[in-house]
Amino acid sequence: MTLRDLAGLRDQILLERLDLIVPRVMHRTGIDCWIVAAREYNEDPVLTTMLPSDWFNARRRTVLVFTDYGRERAAIARYDVGDAFRGVWDGTGDQWLAVAHHVAAAGPDRIAVNESSTFPLADGLSSSEAAALRAALGAESGQRIVSANDLAVGWLETRSPTEMAHYPALCRQAHELLARALSPAVVIPGITSTEDVAWWLREESTNQGFRCWFHPTVSVQRPEGRERRSFTAAPPDVIIERGDLLHIDFGIEHLGLHTDQQQHAYVLRPGESAPPSGLRTGLAAANRAQDHLLAQFATGRTGNQILGAALAAARTDGIDAMVYSHPIGLHGHAAGPTIGLWDAQVDVPGAGDHAVWPDTAYSIELSATVPIPEWDGRHVRIMLEEDAYFDGDRIEYLDGRQTEFWTI
């Protein structure tokens, strides 16, 4: 597919999202007017997801206004913003005054703006823009102006049919890159370093037309040395040796969608044909922890409720698990319900109180810590992450999950 074809597909997806998702979430939140505004080079994260493919940023000041619960949308500008927003300017010389006139004509009950103390992605209205908007709307509009927190999050977290037609293939392509990175084609024991693998992933992703949205994390656990119990320090660049358990955290972006996956490979020692039994038992425990987490998804349940129930089920199953899952979609660490943090295995105030809604995607991210008899009882963390989609009734992996170690 050419770059031009990709741009056309991106614009098709954008129009579908604006037509289907904006009215849906505006009705759900009871907001009949939504103003999304930002200046060039200081873009609101929501605004950037609404711009057409040939707009790389806002122009001067870009103001998008949704009225009548999203059925009407306009750009308060002297030109259209792509095919999605017709340019509306009533002739006044002041853009904010033109915004005020447009909103007054619509007569909304509630005017939502992107201000949020909970979700950074919903907090994109800068202080100076907020002040100018409020001044233009007038003091009498003060009580009608509300936070667009739930509205902005709903827009960002909800996936459209066309997005979901492409998302599984993107996850499959990311899995294929991981499989190659965790193979003898890339890793030569005693020679290849963890950063060599990370940079191979960066290079190969770029060659295939994808963008890594974070630098891949590649690390090893081995029978000797410090146990991996903390996330606080980045793993050092080390030479990969035989007998190592190799781990990669990796994510790519394409068509505005993001993946986030973690998998493992075992580097066979001379004479070995499979990983030690203790490691295989640990992977099975981590898979069961994934099952317990997915079993807790239900429309209306909060991230905190899912976290508590999943951890309780894992404990009952004898699994020493940590859960730190998150939404995924237009961003890698996307807006939506936080389901635990690696340093907070209890309720996460704010983001953890957000409910799960249908047509949303998540990175099912967790770990299980297990003792390995073959490693003199040393504890190893099996860290897994796979992308999944919740349709409102069921949650399923977009391209399966790792149930056996790759071997090198």
Image (cartoon, grey):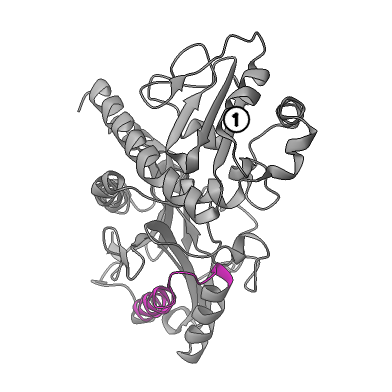
**Residue 181 in the figure: left or right of residue 327:** left
Q: Is 284 one of the magenta-colored residues? A: yes
In the image, residue 133 sits, relative to residue 394, either above or below, namely above
Residue at the location (63% across, 36% down)? 124
Please give the name of the residue rendered at 54% of the width and 61% of the height, measured from the top-left corner: 337
Q: What residue is at 22 percent from the left and 23 percent from the top?
A: 2
Return the residue nearer the eye: 365 or 67: 67
Does the magenta segment cover residue 10? no
**Quadrant where the C terminus is found in the figure:** bottom left
Q: Residue 142, position in %: x, y?
A: 76, 40
Quick check: can you spot residue 201? no
| Near-viewer residue (163 or 63) | 63
Give the residue furthest to the left. Answer: 1
Kind of residue at disc 1: Val
What segment is highlighted magenta in the picture? 280-304
Q: Secondary structure at mark 1?
A: helix
**In the rendered image, which residue does mark 1 sit on?**
103
Residue 26: % across, % down: 50, 48
Which quadrant would residue 126 be assigned to in this image? top right
| Residue ID at (46%, 64%) | 365
- Residue 83 sits in which quadrant? top left
In the rendered image, the vertical position of residue 123 relative to residue 350, given as above or below:
above
